[in-house]
């Protein structure tokens, strides 16, 4: 169906409370990439939200494939959202509900080379369930807009002097002898691309640590990289106008980008 014809109830809990879960995936020639990892994260979030997903993974996969087949995009992003559906407005979770499932695909161009962006550093004002891919994204839309207003692309969050992640990405700091990334906890989303990058680092025998990273580590890094499903890996040129490394070489960024491109098509 066309987007203009798609309707949901004004009482949908996603609309009323911003209570919902989503995933953004990509597909190449109807081949849904890394979907097992996306479905796993969706199910982890659903457990947290006590949202019963009335489909098995293979049923979900078939539903998405049907949308892909009807749209014929060579390369596209797939947006999937679940809520508990419409219910009388009440903060308590409804005991009975019919979930709303929305699947949308949009044509999408895979980046052909490593993108380099400017970023800003912002206080992480988000909550303590950042590991849930929740549709309540006001802090993230606010942060992205602050970044754009400052001539940048991404906001990098810090919480009490510790780096967490980007507003729409995970964070990697590259040093001569190792790569650091914030460890998984309730303050970061377990990115599907983050896991892919860790796999690439393992295959290349590059040392990495998932750890607690003080904010001032940024200024000593040779490269700062951001990862997400739609952007893949992106290098940061400067943060708050301060250059990262020499501001010119993003060697590991390029290497990871190339490895990721190869993996995305397998
Ligand atoms: C806050 C946040 N962190 C990390 C990511 C990266 O996750 P993924 O690699 O699964 O796209 C995203 C993606 O939208 C995000 O919104």
Image: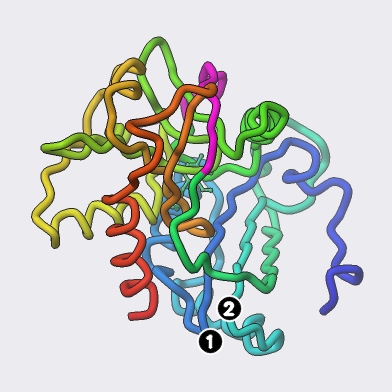
Q: Is residue 148 left or right of residue 24?
A: right
> In front here: 147 or 47?
147
124 magenta-colored: yes
Residue 175 visible in image: yes
Note whether 193 is above or below 225 in the view shown.
below
Note whether 213 is above or below 24 in the view shown.
above
Quadrant location, the N terminus: bottom right
Q: Which residues are magenta?
A: 117-129
Residue where numbered disc 1 is placed = 29
Quadrant location, the C terminus: bottom left
> In front here: 43 or 190?
190
Residue 177 falls in image quadrant: top left
Secondary structure under the numbered disc 1 in the rendered image:
loop
Q: Are marks 1 and 2 in contact (CB under 8 Å)?
A: yes
Q: Is residue 146 left or right of residue 182?
A: right
Q: Residues within 10 Å of mark 1 (few under 14, many from 20)?
A: few
Q: Is residue 16 left or right of residue 43?
A: right
**CB of residue at label 1: within 8 Å of ligand 1?**
no
Between discs 1 and 2, the one toward the N terminus: 1
Distance CA(mark 1)–CA(mark 2): 6 Å
Residue 75 badge: 2
Note whether 41 is above or below 15 in the view shown.
below
156 magenta-colored: no
> In front here: 29 or 179?
179
Note whether 149 is above or below 96 in the view shown.
above
Residue 92 visible in image: no
């Amino acid at each position: 169906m066309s987007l203009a014809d798609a309707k949901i109830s004004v009482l949908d809990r996603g609309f009323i409370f911003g209570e919902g879960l989503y995933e953004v995936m990509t597909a190449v020639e109807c081949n849904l990439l890394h979907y097992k990892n996306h479905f796993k994260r969706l199910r982890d979030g659903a457990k947290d939200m006590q949202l019963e997903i009335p489909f098995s993974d293979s049923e979900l996969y078939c539903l998405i494939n049907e949308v892909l087949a009807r749209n014929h995009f060579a390369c596209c992003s797939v947006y999937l959202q679940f809520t508990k559906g419409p219910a009388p407005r009440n903060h308590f979770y409804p005991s009975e509900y019919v979930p709303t499932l929305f699947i949308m695909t949009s044509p999408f161009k895979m980046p052909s080379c490593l993108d380099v962006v400017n970023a800003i550093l912002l206080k992480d004002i988000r909550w303590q369930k950042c590991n849930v891919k929740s549709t309540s994204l006001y802090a993230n839309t606010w942060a992205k807009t602050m970044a754009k207003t400052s001539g940048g692309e991404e906001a990098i969050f810090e919480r009490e002097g510790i780096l967490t992640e980007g507003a729409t990405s995970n964070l990697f700091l590259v040093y001569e002898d190792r790569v650091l990334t914030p460890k998984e906890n309730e303050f970061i989303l377990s990115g599907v691309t983050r896991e892919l990058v860790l796999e690439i680092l393992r295959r290349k025998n590059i040392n990495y640590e998932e750890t607690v990273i003080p904010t001032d580590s940024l200024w000593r890094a040779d490269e700062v990289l951001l990862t997400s499903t739609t952007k893949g890996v992106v290098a940061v040129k400067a943060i708050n106008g301060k250059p990262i490394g020499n501001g010119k070489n993003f060697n590991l960024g390029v290497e990871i980008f190339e490895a990721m491109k190869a993996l995305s098509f397998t």
